[in-house]
Image (tube, helix red, strand yellow):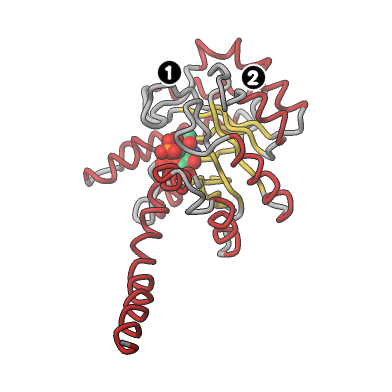
Amino acid sequence: MTVLSVNVNKIAVLRNSRGGAEPDIVRAATACLDAGAHGITVHPRPDARHVRADDVDALAALTAARGVELNLEGNPFAPARAGYPGFLALCKRVRPAQATLVPDDDGQLTSDHGFDFARDAARLAPLIAELKALGCRVSVFADAHGDAVQRASVARAAEIGADRVELYTGPYAEAFESGDASDVLARFAHTARVAQAAGLGINAGHDLNQHNLPGFLRAVPGVLEVSIGHALVAEALYAGLAATVGAYRRIVDSGQRLR
Ligand SMILES: CC(=O)[C@@H](O)[C@H](O)COP(=O)(O)O
Ligand SMILES: NCC(=O)COP(=O)(O)O
């Protein structure tokens, strides 16, 4: 079974653009869970442009109360700064059911690559051990679209103690948009098999949407979790705008009748 974890980063982006409390991230996450989402994902960045540390606390309380997974994503090597205690410190504070390690740099617009396991394995291993001692399942962000050597390197994630890999699906989404994703999908399916043979579970995420997700799940067997945020929030706007504009029309129309 594939579970759906909704990434609510973009709700926070909208809220932060005005500096107030709306849209309320806990209310939005609650609506996602009420609608059937299996869990909530957030990826706080050191510059606090998305969710902030206090949002992580609030969402940890919500997910604990609802008995669902909080998937906390972040770069474990990014230093702490004012307002951001660092990824490990946040994990110690809220003990997410799943910690997903992502190698995104500070200035990056969004996540755009997985770990280079040949280079990063030695420094990831003690962090993974620490997170597992906290009780977190540990997933590491991994590329799946490269050459055979790169695809085989995903097995290193098992050697350093990870439970799962999250396959970075951005390149698949891009290929899907260009009209022919078959080669890229074959690479993802191969990487997933290598990872599964090494004992790793498969998560997937980045730029998945209602159009490209069905083909991905058909081609890549045994995906345990997808985390989806950007497109899902955009689609929710399209789905909700008609009802909301209708509600406002009823208000302004009834106001006119009273005059
Ligand atoms: C690891 C990953 O792919 C997501 O966490 C993604 O980065 C979320 O999107 P934003 O960076 O736009 O919040
Ligand atoms: N791990 C991927 C994620 O949480 C959401 O990515 P996106 O759907 O916002 O691109």
Label 1: few (<14), some or many (≥20) within 10 Å?
few
Q: Is residue 189 left or right of residue 198?
A: left
Which dot, 2 or 1, sits closer to the camera?
Answer: 2
Q: Quadrant of residue 165?
A: top right
Q: What is the x, y in percent for residue 70?
A: 64, 44
In the rendered image of this protein, does residue 26 appear above or below residue 187?
A: below
Question: Quadrant of the image for the C terminus?
Answer: bottom left
Residue marked by disc 2: 159
Give how far apart the Cα atoms at labels 2 and 1 are. Answer: 16 Å
Residue drawn 68% across the image and 15% down it: 126
Viewer can see residue 70: yes
Residue drawn 55% across the image and 49% down it: 5
Residue marked by disc 1: 149
Q: What is the x, y in percent for residue 92?
A: 72, 28
Q: What is the x, y in percent for residue 175?
A: 28, 40
Residue drawn 66% across the image and 19% down it: 127
Label 2: few (<14), some or many (≥20) within 10 Å?
some
Q: Is residue 33 left or right of residue 170?
A: right
